[in-house]
Amino acid sequence: MSKPRVAFFDFSSCEGCQLQIANLEEEILDLISLVDVVSFREVMKEHSDEYDIAFVEGSIMRPIDERRLRKIRKHAKIVVALGACATIGGINKIRNQWPVENVKKEVYGSEHLEDNDYFDVFPTKALNEVVPVDFYIHGCPINYDEFKHVVTSLALGKKPDIPTYPVCVECKKNENICLFELGKFCLGPITRAGCKAICPTNGSPCDGCRGILKKPNTDCVQDILDRYHLTYEEMKSRCVLYNYSKEECK
Amino acid sequence: MAPLPTIKIISKRELNVFIDNLIQKSKSEVIGVKAKGERYVFAPLTDASELCLNYDVTILPPKKYFLPQYEPLMNYDLKKPFKVEKNLQDFSRILIGVHPYDIIALEQSDKVYLDPQKDDFYDQRRKNTIIIGADIQKVSKRSFAASMNTHITDSGFDLLLTNIGSHYAITIGSEKGKKLLEKYASTKIATEDDRKKIEKTRESIVSNYKKKVKVEKEQWSSTLVANYDHALWEEKSDRCLGCSSCTMVCPTCYCYDIKDDVTFSLKDGTRIRTWDGCLLHDFTKISSGEVFRDDIRDRYRHRFYRKGNYLPARYDFVACVGCGRCGIACLPDIADPCDVLNELSHLDYTDGTHKFFIEQKKKPTAVQGTIHLPRSATIQQVKRLTESEIYLQIELDDKKPLGHSPGQFVEISLFGIGEAPISISSAPGTSPLFELVVRKVGNVTSKLFTMKKGDKVGIRGPFGNGFTIKDFENKHLLFVLGGLGLPPMRSLINYILDKKNRQHFKDVTILYGCKQPCQVLFLDEIKKWQKMENVVCKLTVDQCEKNECWAGEVGLITTLFPEIKIDKSTIQDTMAIVIGPPIMYKFVIKCLQTLGVPDTNIFVSLERRMKCGVGKCGHCQINGVYVCREGPVFKYNDIKNLPEAFE
């Protein structure tokens, strides 16, 4: 069996998730023993449009992005969304709170940007709002153990095992003091696990970068706020950071 | 009366010397209770001064040292045909400061993990760990241990420390404890006065418990039986996050999941056991996508019934020790059994009609050796049956027969991928060869589709209880089989229809339904059956494309019932065997009852998420019944009143 050909692409993002992969250092040799990397702007000059698996980082902001993503989808057998910007829209969705025109004006002032494709923006979309996505590597940034898990799973022909349970499970296993007990609002209870609860374990509340669980029960939110003397505003500001469009977070 | 335990007295200064000696000289890893912020944890000690014996409760119970959060069970080499090594490492450990309720919880886990199918990883940890308990000095505000009588214990420790003011008393609980003390501590023998002080200390702590359960421990079970359909479960679970924090921090929760993890180079991998929780949505999910406890109410309720009814009936203990950790951990504060039982105690209730158990007549087959390690086996034949099903003939490499009965299953194991439970479809016998029919639904079964003759697989089992041929002798037999229900019954049918055996059975009727004609399995054999005397065999498919060639009926399996003629006089003598997808049972059983087949004459084989095969991991439970141990074959009459069986 020939090695699958892999390409990396980026849209609106900090490209930090690809950097996580570049940070694999000597393990990158294991990666290239499993797959042929044909395109990876951060680490190589060459590029090819012949690939089986596309890892795509970033959010979709403009019609030209959409066209490019569709082209990638056409070339690739498997599309993997890489990181929060790609999987859920993430931080880039904060701007969806305001009309696009206002955002443009705020950023570019009165510059004349009409008829320029580069500045023709629409409200931020995650990849799956444009094309079907096969697998997701969540997080901001991605956790490279999970990246390795996804790559090895695809190489072995199995479906990657991405947790469907909340961060609390991993947080409890780490024996952390619950941040609610410390008076902090944490999104761990409704956020998809897989990060090994890295933020709460280091004392920082979960911001929900891996996305909100499928059917979170939010009926108890008020009880929890009351029990731990937290405010609604505090909760909302935390929800907006990565999950602006999610109804559950409003 | 048991003899009084030996009790020694040690000064607080000498106790520190004892602990430091253990840390420095004992060659054991010394774990004790340490402060973590405002709370406490069990963690390695580097100095006696770190040890806190006046703690209230630790965040996690000491179960993490016996069933670790992430536990490598075995390592394997993916480049070699079947190279696997059990990951049992030798070590010795001393646990200091374990409260009585946690000691009792460990004794409960012993019953589950050491009997009757020993878990050798747990066993080794238990054997290599010395427990130095500590009587409670400060009561956790959520604890109700005094109501559960778990605030004190007279067993389960090697040594037990009690603060009696100026000194600590040390109760000796084992020979190991005694030796440890002799070697590393300087103590005095306790006086009668010291013994009285211990008693007084233990008695006085009771009044510090603010939380009390109004339902006696012995009454938990009947209280729960009576309230299975109570609105409380719905009301409380409406606020449940389904995060399973309650089970993670519980000292008596022991359910687990097993995952395969391979290195980036794909050269080697590890099979890892990790904590699972029955409150999590996917806890009961099987590869085909079915989730057996989909509703949060059912998952929420399940936990309380496990604690208060299912485990007490099986092992004779209430699986709650009143530590109160779940009450602390649950954000909406709905997990505390003390609160729930107290609410139920106010209610007037009528006697429940539900049954949560079956009378256990058959013992599960004992598995030899380690319960996790698969045996090496080789695929001898692969046949594509349909688009989505293959037939595998497998031989155990030790050339021993599998030793199964019809209806039992094996866990087929592919390193790097995982395990899947598959029914055995060949007849029992002396050959080391056996057969499986596999449908492509999950990771393991999809991978099996790519495998060929000579490839290695791992086999665990056979597990569970199958059919007993004696039950069918001199009876008319009616098989109702849906989809993959045929393969496990094929061996039994072929046995019955064999010339040598045919005389022992009366008329045989076989109804078999599939989704589409292309999914019909073993058509050649079916055609042979159809030609036999005193055999009626009818086929149906749910749907048939216009261009497909199909001679049978079109419609659900229930449409075949009007076509069969069973003499009213023989109905009491008819045994019905029903195997199919979960959805099928409800409708087929109704048809059988309409025909007049008594419930005691109906046999079913149920599908659930079977992971361990030995009644430990918790996934396959139907109320108090473990499908992997008591089933998968059941008499319908035995399980019809189990609320979760045919929901």
Image (cartoon, coloured by chain):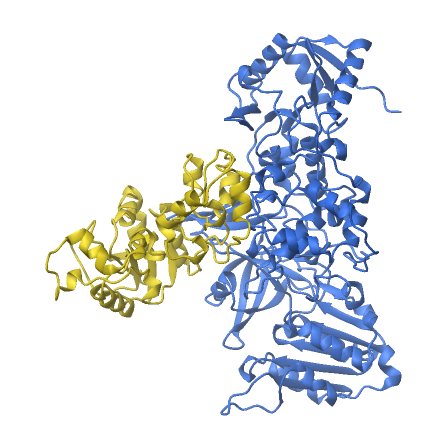
Chain colours: A yellow, B blue
Residue at image coords 59%, 39%: B249
**Residue at the outermost left position:** A112
Question: Would you say B639 lies left or right of B303 here?
Answer: right
Q: Quadrant of residue B58?
A: top right
Where does the C terminus of chain B fall, quadrant-wise?
bottom right
Where does the N terminus of chain B fall, quadrant-wise?
top right
Q: Please state which of residues A213 and B234 is positioned toward the viewer in this rendering.
A: B234
Compared with A78, B196 (above or below) is above
Q: How far from the left and from the top, in percent, is residue B64?
A: 58, 36
Residue at image coords 71%, 42%: B319
Residue B86 visible: no
Question: Would you say A88 lies left or right of B7 here?
Answer: left
Q: How far from the left and from the top, in percent, is residue A249?
A: 43, 53
Residue at image coords 75%, 61%: B642
Q: Please state which of residues B244 and B223 is positioned toward the viewer in this rendering.
A: B223
Compared with B38, B510 (above or below) is below
Question: Would you say B431 lies left or right of B438 here?
Answer: right
Q: Please state which of residues B395 and B612 is positioned toward the viewer in this rendering.
A: B612
Q: How far from the left and from the top, in percent, is residue B424?
A: 64, 66
Q: Quadrant of residue B644?
A: bottom right
Q: How far from the left and from the top, in percent, is residue B341?
A: 73, 44
Question: Would you say B461 lies left or right of B452 here?
Answer: right
Residue A27 visible: yes
* Tally of numbered tags: 0
Compared with B17, A84 (above or below) is below
